[in-house]
Image (cartoon, rainbow, N blue to C red):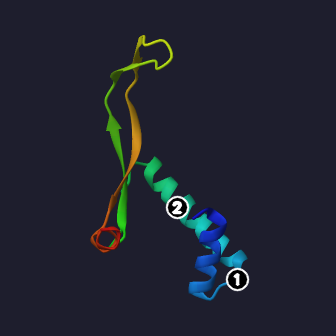
Amino acid sequence: MNKAQLIDAIAKDADLTKAQAKKALDAFVKATTHSLKTGQRVALVGFGSFSVTKRNARTGRNPQTGKEIRIPAKKVVRFKAGSDLSHVVK
């Protein structure tokens, strides 16, 4: 499902116009992004939670040359599925 399809589904399920659904989705993405940038966790009970974790520096390999390269440490977004979502996917 892409963004346009998600907007269509939200509009249909919530009885909103597509413009209202797009505005709501964009607001959710903006609020989630802001929270993660400030180090906060975003938890949606039953669905799952988004958090920021630190990935340590490590050694990788260039697939073209086989030469070892150093991959620096960085922060990454992590999603952990909640109980309701986990039961759907099984």
Q: Residue at x 29, y 72 (%)?
A: 87
Label 1 sits on residue: 17
Q: Residue at x 51, y 54 (%)?
A: 33
Residue 21 shown left or right of residue 78 in the figure: right
Q: Residue at x 51, y 17 (%)?
A: 64
- Place of residue 2 in the rendered image (x, y in percent of width and height, measured from the top left): 61, 62
Of the numbered discs 2 and 1, the one sitting upstream in the chain is: 1
- Place of residue 26 in the rendered image (x, y in percent of width and height, measured from the top left): 62, 64
The local secondary structure at tag 1 comes to loop
- Three-letter amino acid code of the residue under disc 1: Thr
Give the number of the disc on residue 31: 2
- Place of residue 86 in the rendered image (x, y in percent of width and height, measured from the top left): 30, 68
The span from disc 2 to disc 1 (Cα, nearest Å) is: 21 Å
57 to 84, vertically: above or below: above
- Marks 2/1 in contact by CB < 8 Å: the verdict is no
- Three-letter amino acid code of the residue under disc 2: Ala
Picture mark count: 2
Which quadrant is home to the N terminus?
A: bottom right
